[in-house]
Image (cartoon, rainbow, N blue to C red):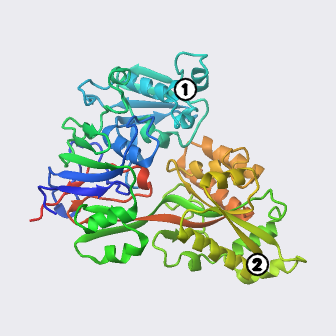
């Protein structure tokens, strides 16, 4: 790789160390001074829209992140830290958030940012006319329901107290709210450009971010150039060039990397050994916030028996399933380690085949189970066969049911017609509420297990309303333990992602957010000499 040339990067798993409150990004350890300039080439799936409230996949969200900012953002450890808000306070009852904005911040077209821009942007996010899939996460803002149903022309809980002070009032305290404000849909946008119908905003995005849209040639490339007026200092890179492709596979991108046409790539599992041993490459492999689990339909006539569910859980040898699989990190808990409430030492492995056999001896006939999944890959089919074999080894009779699509599988699951099922869950934001409340609250439409525990419901509501993160962590740890002990689910693994880059690409950091949150403002390119 030559510094004067571009560096290519498959846009998927690269997160970056963040620097706050200083005009230039922090100097890396050991006195290394980052080089400025150069072009970082990326490859991404062709986006449809770069409007923050309409970006509906990871590829779009990644590009949006470079162009726009919100009030707060995540650091490398998923802490919520200042962005366009230099500081904030929360009322004792957890309902009122008051943000003091940085002064002198400008949109990329030159206008200065004001608090009223956030009132407009968050109101627009909630406006049903824009049909944002993410609006559902922000309806806790006071007056959102009246605004969405047309009973009010404004959102009562959004107020600009003065040009530099924004106040957001909630209907009820909601612990995850600050983390939601760090997500891309809560980015600030300029009203005058959004409402310019001659230039659709999704194709002509303008924000306050570290990079601005230079050009977008549909079906070919997107070019982003450094924002010299960025509030924390101009980024090190001069430009990001994104080659847009109709589809993007790990195998295709890795071959392009090996051929010298890319500088970073996804790595197919069968190429991990090659990627990890070349001294001129940097190989990164780590888990992200995506849980794979074996779900149990607790409304099923057989699986409503807790002893049957215990026997299922005790029969599964995860080390045999994933021990050598570079794309999975075995887990015995529901919450990934970076999240509030995750068990510091992890939870114990439940594998105990002899105990499972002893439980099943009390049944006159071998219990018959159906294991459901969508036919997605030969590897997944092989995994299902191994799970079935382990269940049969303790005394179950298992039939594997492979459906043609994930939509068909989900239809069966939510109709409570699937007994056991293999699924994955990607967290929408880094808070335990995004997983535990969504999957395990008895009234959640996304609860795939038919699981209902009044005490878990009450604790989930208490954890949502708690303002103190330490208290929330205690509650979620307790909730996770209760759910695991009820056996509606067996956590199997956290999905891992592998990438490889030439060593000249610096300041890359893979975070547990994976695809969802990959700022590039601190990436720099090391000169060859």
Q: Pick whichever, 395 or 123, lies toward us.
A: 395
Q: Residue at x 38, y 43 (%)?
A: 47
Q: Is 53 positioned to the left or the right of 384 in the image?
A: left
Q: Is residue 300 above or below residue 136?
A: below
Q: Position of residue 33 (x, y in %)?
A: 15, 57
Q: Residue at x 57, y 21 (%)?
A: 147
Q: Is residue 451 above or below residue 117?
A: below
Q: Residue furthest right?
A: 364
* Residue 492 visible: yes
**Residue 128: assigned label:** 1
Q: Residue at x 42, y 20 (%)?
A: 161
Mark 2: give few (<14), some (14-19) or many (20+) Cα within 10 Å.
many
The secondary element bearing badge 2 is classed as helix
The secondary element bearing badge 1 is classed as helix
Q: Pick whichever, 383 or 108, lies toward us.
A: 383
Distance of mark 2 from mark 1, alpha carbons?
51 Å
Mark 1: give few (<14), some (14-19) or many (20+) Cα within 10 Å.
some
């Amino acid at each position: 790789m030559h510094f004067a040339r571009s560096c290519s990067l498959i846009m998927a798993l690269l997160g970056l160390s963040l620097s706050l409150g200083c005009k230039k990004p922090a100097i890396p350890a050991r006195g290394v001074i980052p080089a400025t300039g150069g072009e970082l080439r990326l490859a991404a799936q062709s986006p449809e829209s770069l409007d923050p409230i309409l970006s509906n996949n990871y590829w779009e969200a990644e590009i949006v992140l470079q162009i726009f900012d919100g009030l707060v953002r995540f650091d490398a450890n998923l802490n919520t830290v200042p962005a366009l808000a230099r500081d904030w306070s929360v009322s004792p009852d957890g309902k009122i958030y008051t943000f003091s904005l940085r002064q002198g911040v400008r949109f990329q077209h030159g206008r200065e940012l004001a608090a009223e821009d956030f009132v407009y942007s968050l109101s627009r996010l909630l406006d049903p006319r824009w049909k944002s899939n993410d609006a559902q996460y922000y309806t806790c803002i006071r007056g959102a329901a009246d605004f969405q149903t047309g009973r009010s022309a404004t959102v009562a809980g959004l107020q600009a107290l003065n040009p530099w002070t924004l106040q957001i009032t909630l209907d009820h305290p909601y612990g995850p709210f600050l983390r939601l404000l760090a997500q891309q849909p809560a980015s600030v946008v300029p009203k005058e450009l959004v409402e310019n119908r001659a230039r659709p905003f999704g194709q002509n995005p303008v924000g306050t971010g570290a990079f601005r849209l230079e050009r977008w040639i549909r079906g070919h490339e997107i070019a982003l150039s450094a924002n010299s007026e960025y509030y924390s200092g101009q980024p090190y890179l001069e430009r990001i060039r994104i080659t847009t492709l109709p589809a993007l596979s790990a195998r295709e991108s890795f071959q392009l990397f090996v051929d010298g046409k890319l500088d970073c790539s996804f790595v197919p599992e069968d190429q991990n050994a090659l990627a990890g041993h070349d001294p001129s490459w940097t190989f990164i492999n780590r888990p992200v916030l995506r849980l794979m689990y074996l779900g149990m339909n607790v409304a099923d006539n057989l699986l409503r028996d807790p002893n049957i569910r215990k026997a299922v859980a005790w029969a599964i040898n995860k080390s045999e399933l994933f021990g050598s699989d570079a794309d999975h990190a075995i887990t015995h808990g529901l919450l990934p380690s970076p999240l509030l409430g995750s068990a510091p030492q992890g939870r114990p492995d439940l594998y105990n085949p002899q105990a499972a056999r002893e439980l099943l001896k009390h049944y006159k006939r071998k219990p018959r189970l159906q294991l459901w999944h969508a036919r997605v890959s030969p590897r997944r089919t092989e995994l299902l066969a191994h799970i079935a074999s382990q269940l049969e080894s303790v005394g179950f009779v298992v039939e594997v049911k492979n459906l043609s699509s994930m939509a068909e599988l989900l239809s069966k699951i939510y109709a409570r017609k699937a007994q056991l099922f293999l699924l994955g869950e990607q967290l929408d934001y880094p808070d335990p509420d995004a997983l535990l409340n969504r999957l395990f609250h008895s009234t959640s439409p996304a609860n795939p297990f038919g699981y209902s525990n009044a005490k878990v419901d009450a604790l989930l509501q208490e954890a949502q309303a708690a303002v103190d993160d330490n208290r929330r962590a205690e509650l979620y740890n307790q909730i996770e333990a209760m759910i695991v002990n009820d056996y509606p689910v067996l956590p199997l693994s956290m999905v891992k992602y592998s990438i490889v880059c030439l060593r000249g690409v610096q300041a890359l950091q893979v975070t547990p957010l994976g695809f969802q949150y990959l700022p590039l403002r601190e990436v720099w390119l090391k000169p060859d000499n």
